Amino acid sequence: MSSVTIECVLPEHCRCGESPVWEEASNSLLFVDIPSKKLCRWDLLSKQVHRVTLDAPVSSVALRQAGGYVATVGTKFCAVDWEDQSASVLATIDEDKKNNRFNDGKVDPAGRYFAGTMAEETAPGVLERRQGSLYCLFPDHHVEKYFDQVDISNGLDWSLDHKIFYYIDSLSYSVDAFDYDVQTGKISNRRSVYKLEKDEHIPDGMCIDAEGKLWVACYNGGRVIRLDPETGKRLQTVKLPVDKTTSCCFGGKDYSEMYVTCAREGIDPEGLLWQPEAGGIFKITGLGVKGIPPRPYIG
């Protein structure tokens, strides 16, 4: 086994960095800083970071086949034109709860954009329970609501054969699976495939690797864990020098590097002394496994 190395490659100081997405075409890592309302793109060649500030918390970003990006901003699905730094609304969800916002989102194998909501936090991890829902933005820009009663809608991805949808509601401390119909986007038969242990804390963002195993960032757990969703066993733990790890994706020229986002908000000054890189972007190499490219939204 090659040895695993972890480095903070971008000392960004995100209040809550999230939704890392590799963009092969520009050799860049996209990510968001939710409370700062920023969508960021870090060019790995020039090492420059470009940031676009939107008018509400931006919680997830995805590639768009037509060019530019799509993002969840407040309670809206938006198209983002990177060149003129503007966002236009594709759809607004009919949340009757006025303090809700989107959280994590990802594009499915057919090009639909799945994203869920949560109540706005009064402090990190402190919020009104069961206020969120899971939605899907279809290519024709209509939105369907899949289920509600969600605490913190989070990590999502699909099995390599496109028959299973994996999903996390953070405060259930569980990684769940649904049967998934790639033709219609319908999901059914929810079950838990992994329950987090106490020291793993809160499951957050998630991605799948080329072997069909899941990687979950553990908020307050300072780690990413690799799970086998078929056996329910944890296969690997990679600890980071920061507590509030939020999400992960594979990237780099052959998708063999993992990028991990984290949060700075909610750490007291004393805590920041021993984790000064909190809020930065981390790169993990030597995992010995590759990821798969992100899919663009086709609408």
Image (spheres, grey):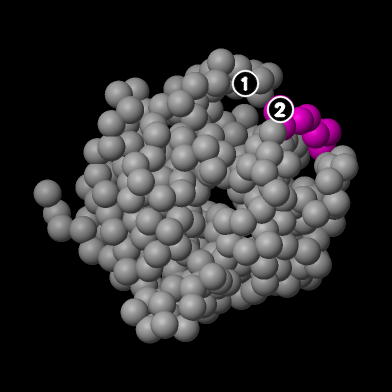
> Is residue 145 rendered magenta in the image?
yes
Image check: 17 left or right of 144? Answer: left
User: Which residue does the image show at 14% across and 54% down from the upper left?
Assistant: 2
**On the image, numbered disc 2 is attached to which residue?**
146
Residue 84 in the image, given as x and y percentages of width and height: 78, 70
Residue 14 in the image, given as x and y percentages of width and height: 55, 72
> Is residue 51 rendered magenta in the image?
no
The region drawn magenta spans 138-148
User: Which residue does the image show at 38% across and 84% down from the upper left?
Assistant: 273
User: Which residue does the image show at 33% across and 28% down from the upper left?
Assistant: 232
Q: Is residue 49 above or below residue 29?
A: below
Q: Is residue 40 above or below residue 183?
A: below
* Residue 35 at least partly seen: yes
Spatial CA span between label 2 and label 1: 8 Å
* Residue 45 at least partly seen: no
Image check: 143 left or right of 65? Answer: right
Amino acid type, mark 1? Ile
**On the image, numbered disc 1 is attached to which residue?**
187
Q: Secondary structure at mark 1?
A: strand
